Image: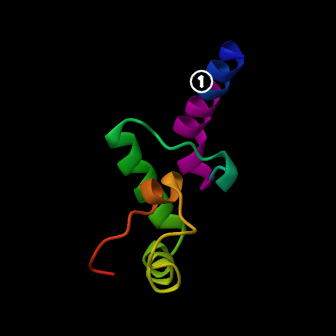
C-alpha cells in the first residue's frame, strides 16, 4: 500500500510541476491533500484563491455557520477564516 501511495504522490507532483500551470489544470476537490509543509500549504491556498471566490465562500461560512459545526480540519487549513471578512 505504501509503495502505491508513494508512486501516486510522485506522479501527482511530476504532473503538477510540468502540466498544471501550462494547461490551467486542477485536481478534483476530493483529491486535494492538505500539505504538511507551510510553504506548500500557502501555495495551495493561493492556487485555490485563483480558481474560486474564497472570500465570498468564507463570508458565507461565517454568516451561515458561525460556530463552524459544518467545518472540518481540511476546510480550516485550505480556507482559513480571517477576522476581516
Q: Quadrant of residue 55?
A: bottom left
68 shown above or below 60: above
55 vs 22, nearest the viewer: 55
Name the residue at 58% across, 68% down: 70
5 vs 14, nearest the viewer: 5
How many marks the image carries: the answer is: 1
Q: Position of residue 14 (x, y in %)?
A: 57, 29
Q: Position of residue 19 (x, y in %)?
A: 60, 41
23 vs 49, nearest the viewer: 49
Magenta span: 10-25
- In the visual, does 25 lie left or right of 78? right
Q: Position of residue 47 (x, y in %)?
A: 47, 56
Chief SS of the magenta region: helix
- The colour scheme of the drawn protein is rainbow
Would you name the residue on which mark 1 appears? 10
| Camera sees residue 28 | no
Q: Quadrant of residue 80?
A: bottom left
Picture quarter with the N terminus: top right
- In the visual, does 76 lie left or right of 13? left
Q: Secondary structure at mark 1?
A: helix
The extreme top residue here reads 3
67 vs 37, nearest the viewer: 67
The extreme left residue here reads 84
Name the residue at 61% across, 35% down: 15
Magenta includes 37?
no
Name the residue at 66% across, 45% down: 31
| Camera sees residue 38 | yes
Q: Position of residue 8 (x, y in %)?
A: 67, 26
Label 1: few (<14), some or many (≥20) within 10 Å? few
Name the residue at 66% across, 15% down: 2
Amino acid at each position: 500500500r505504501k509503495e502505491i501511495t508513494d508512486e501516486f504522490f510522485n506522479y501527482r507532483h511530476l504532473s503538477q510541476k510540468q502540466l498544471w500551470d501550462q494547461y490551467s489544470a486542477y485536481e478534483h476537490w476530493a483529491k486535494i491533500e492538505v500539505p504538511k509543509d507551510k510553504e506548500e500549504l500557502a501555495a495551495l491556498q493561493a492556487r485555490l484563491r485563483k480558481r474560486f471566490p474564497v472570500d465570498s465562500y468564507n463570508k458565507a461560512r461565517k454568516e451561515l455557520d458561525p460556530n463552524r459545526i459544518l467545518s472540518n480540519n481540511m476546510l480550516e487549513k485550505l480556507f482559513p477564516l480571517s477576522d476581516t471578512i
